[in-house]
Amino acid sequence: MPARKLPRVVRSSSELLATQRARAAQGQILGLVPTMGALHDGHTALIEEARHRADHLVVSIFVNPLQFDRKGDLRAYPRTFEGDLERCAVAGVDTVFAPTVDDMYPDGFDTRLVAGELGRDFEGAGRPGHFDGVLTVCLKLFVLSQAHFAVFGEKDFQQLCLIRRLVRDLGLPLEIVPVPVLRDTDGLALSSRNVHLGKKLRERALCLYQALCTAQDLAADGERNAGRIQRAAQAVLDAAPSFRTSYCAVVDPSSLQPLDLLVPGQLARLLIAGHIGARPGVRLLDNGPLFVGRT
Ligand code: AMP
């Protein structure tokens, strides 16, 4: 990567808030990309989307303990701060906000946002408190960064829906900008957790993309029965050794309610998640739109 000026690293919430307030007062457009670090090209796609919209771009790097229901998962989460800084420098990030846990959640911190119906199923079903933690940290990041907009990936599709709902429900004065799933050349959705996949598991992990493609092809060929599409995708996942499906569902992309029928002109999405490898395994997520072709 070519060398560039490193972004300014801010560790304290109060410093971030003060500097961002001053920038906003000068009329600058402030952008935010929230991340947990271990940055890859998927994050870079979000940063690039934010870069051309913002006068001042903040990337937050914070492995948020509130959103982990298993301590082991939190401990094992990859941390690559120096490399992340380099990547942010190349992508033209102005400020990296990397607070400590104590700074974000000082002694006595006792408040949580609670995700509603949208957070009940899918990731919410298997990970109690996960979305409460996501919403709580994001609201705090929105306030501290004073952002006019924040960029989120469709990779975490339910999270994106919940964040949009948070903004709408609480009337938060910022825009949420979505970015499509960025994939490796073979189709595997990029994820910080992919570093935990050895060569064999990485090959097997392609079953998520293959299941998605199967569903998309069926829909494009005119299949409108969501159950049949879901079962065809599930069969691909079932055939992959050591993959354990958490869910594979055809849903309305706004309400996340299951669909029975795909209707031309109406949006539909396939959501997939599961674990691969020896238990507890590596958690993998994927999703994509289903476009109905004419029969
Ligand atoms: P994370 O660091 O995993 O919490 O992700 C930070 C942001 O990057 C979230 O909005 C994710 O949805 C997004 N993201 C992660 N991987 C990808 C990807 N492969 N394509 C697009 N966005 C992604």
Image (spheres, grey):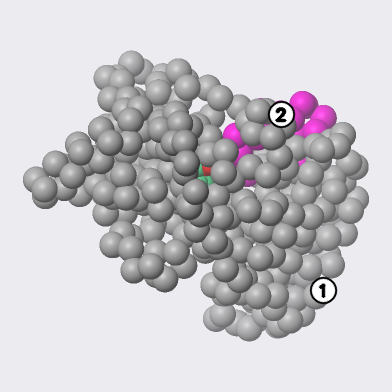
Ligand 1 contact, mark 1 (Cβ < 8 Å)? no
Q: Is residue 170 left or right of residue 62?
A: left
Considering only vertical position in the picture, is 276 above or below 135? above
Tell me if label 2 and label 1 are in contact, CB under 8 Å.
no
**Residue 245 drawn at (x, y percent):** 82, 53
Question: Residue at (25%, 33%) from the top-left corner?
Answer: 15
Say which residue appears at 61% left-offset and 27% top-offset. Answer: 78
The stretch drawn in magenta includes residue 257: no
- Does label 2 or label 1 sit earlier along the sequence? 2
Question: Mark 2 is on which residue type?
Answer: His
- Horizontal side of 79 relative to 213 (left or right) equals left
Could you say which is closer to the camera, residue 275 or residue 142? 142
Q: Position of residue 292 (x, y in %)?
A: 64, 75
- Of residues 208 and 37, the one nearer the viewer is 37
Up the image or down, 273 lies above or below 205; here it is: below
Q: Nearer the viewer, residue 33 or 98?
A: 98
Q: Which residues are magenta?
A: 189-205
Q: Residue at x 65, y 75 (%)?
A: 257
- What amino acid type is highlighted by mark number 1? Arg
Residue 196 circle label = 2
Secondary structure mostly taken by the magenta-highlighted segment of the chain: helix
Q: Secondary structure at mark 1?
A: helix
In the picture, the quarter occupied by the C terminus is bottom right
Q: Residue 50 location, x and y as percent? A: 33, 46
Q: Quick check: is 198 in the magenta stretch?
A: yes
Q: Is residue 47 above or below residue 85?
A: below
Question: How many C-alpha atoms fall within 10 Å of the one at disc 2: few (<14), some, or many (≥20)?
Answer: some
Task: Tell me: residue 195, above or below residue 281.
Answer: above
Task: Name the residue carrying label 1.
Answer: 228
Residue 261 visible: yes
Residue 93 appears in the picture as rendered? no
Calculate the distance from the C-alpha at mark 2 to the C-alpha at mark 1. Answer: 33 Å
